Image (spheres, grey):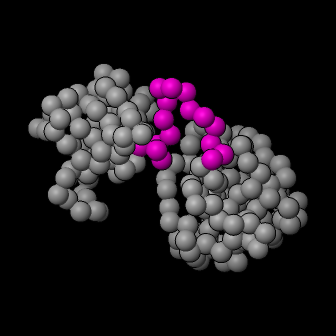
Amino acid sequence: MTTSDASSAVPAADAAWPDDAIEVARIADAWGIKGWFKVHAHSTDPQAIFATRRWFLKPPETAIAGKGVPGLLKILSLREHGDGLVASAEGVSDRNAAEALRGARVFVSRTHFPKADPDEFYWVDLVGLSVVNRQGETLGDVIGLLDTGPHAVLRIQPPGLTAPVKPEQERLVPFVSAFVDDVSLAERRITVDWGLDF
């Protein structure tokens, strides 16, 4: 999942944009003729999307599609279909209305995310954390994660470099117990068994 600045969105009149809005999906295209639409979740386990029926929307970055996207969608139905999701929403009653949503970015409040298990973390909670090794040396800050299939990899921006960093400047540390000693969300720190010269 990725975070995004939600300040430019214009929410529907009956909904305030949540301060903790997290982008969780995108609307791909219309599905059928009765207003249903396809949804591509940013996570392979899209529990946060199913946890709320209030989706906040922003238009796609290109703004070629998605003009006039509403700030809020009230979801009537949502289900898995093939390798994605399909949904219907209040006020979206035909294919034309569903096509108008194409490319819209879907945000939900972080408070709607299901509670993670003790040794599980949402990617969005790891971004921005400081990474130090067992010797107390600072490797940098987490700027993202890569999903390699078997496990995730922390993308770390070394100290002294300003964003955007080039891929070859990033430090990459596998997010597995063999290398990660501790994750403290309260202290905003990840401790790893990883040298500065790796």
In this view, the residue in front, 14 or 4, is 14
Is any atom of residue 189 visible in this view?
A: yes
Q: Position of residue 125 (x, y in %)?
A: 46, 44
Q: Position of residue 22 (x, y in %)?
A: 56, 54
Residue located 73% across and 48% down the image: 52
Residue located 61% across and 72% down the image: 9
Q: Residue furthest left?
A: 197
Is any atom of residue 104 visible in this view?
A: no
Asked whether residue 117 is drawn in magenta, I would say yes
Residue located 80% across and 54% down the image: 75
Q: Is residue 66 left or right of residue 122?
A: right
Residue interval drawn in magenta: 111-126
Q: Is residue 40 above or below residue 67?
A: above
For the C terminus, the quadrant is top left
In this view, the residue in front, 122 or 137, is 137
Q: Position of residue 148 (x, y in %)?
A: 40, 36
In this view, the residue in front, 71 or 187, is 187
Residue located 65% across and 65% down the image: 17
Q: Position of residue 190 (x, y in %)?
A: 32, 36
Q: Is residue 91 left or right of residue 79?
A: right
Q: Residue furthest front?
A: 186
Asked whether residue 181 is drawn in magenta, I would say no
Predominant secondary structure, magenta span: loop
In this view, the residue in front, 139 or 76, is 139
Total marks in image: 0
